Image (cartoon, helix red, strand yellow):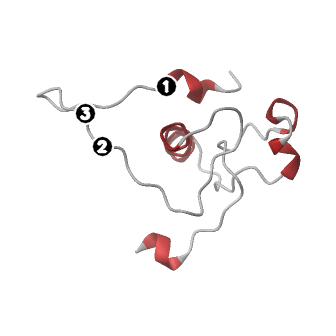
């Protein structure tokens, strides 16, 4: 599916006592793209891309994806704008 991450929207992980585990905070330079994106959906997409592919993650490099993501989408990349990882992000 093209927007498979949307199926996971609203779901959260919980511990053994059924307390919801707080989601990670993403770096400021990592911004979602596409319809109804949020940080949780973006986190799912990036985590999945890291685990299922050995290719580098660059994000969506076409600016046209903002206008119509269904047409201009690079399906091998997560739904985020192109980004560069800095030393501060790693720290």
Dot in front, 1 or 2: 2
Horizontal side, residue 13 vs residue 81: left or right: left
> Element type at marker 3?
loop
Q: Which residue was labeled with disc 3?
A: 20
Left or right of 67? Residue 29 is left
Work out which residue is located at the far bottom of the displayed protein and give it. Answer: 87
* Image spot of residue 58 (x, y percent): 69, 56
Cα–Cα gap, marks 2 and 3: 6 Å
Q: Nearer the viewer, residue 31 or 15?
A: 31
Q: What's the residue at 85%, 35% (across, down)?
A: 68
Tag 2 residue: 22
* Image coords of residue 84 (percent x, y): 64, 68
Report the front residue among 11 and 75.
Answer: 11
Q: Quadrant of residue 16?
A: top left
Which of the numbered marks, if any, corresponds to residue 8?
1
Q: Label 1 to label 2, Cα distance in Å?
A: 15 Å
Cα distance, mark 1 to mark 3?
15 Å
């Amino acid at each position: 599916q093209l927007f498979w991450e949307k199926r996971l929207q609203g779901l959260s992980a919980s511990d053994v006592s059924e307390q919801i585990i707080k989601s990670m905070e993403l770096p400021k330079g990592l911004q979602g793209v596409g319809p109804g994106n949020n940080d949780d959906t973006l986190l799912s997409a990036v985590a999945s891309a890291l685990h299922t592919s050995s290719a580098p993650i660059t994000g969506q490099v076409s600016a046209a994806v903002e206008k119509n993501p269904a047409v201009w989408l690079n399906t091998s990349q997560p739904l985020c704008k192109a980004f560069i990882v800095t030393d501060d992000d790693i720290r």
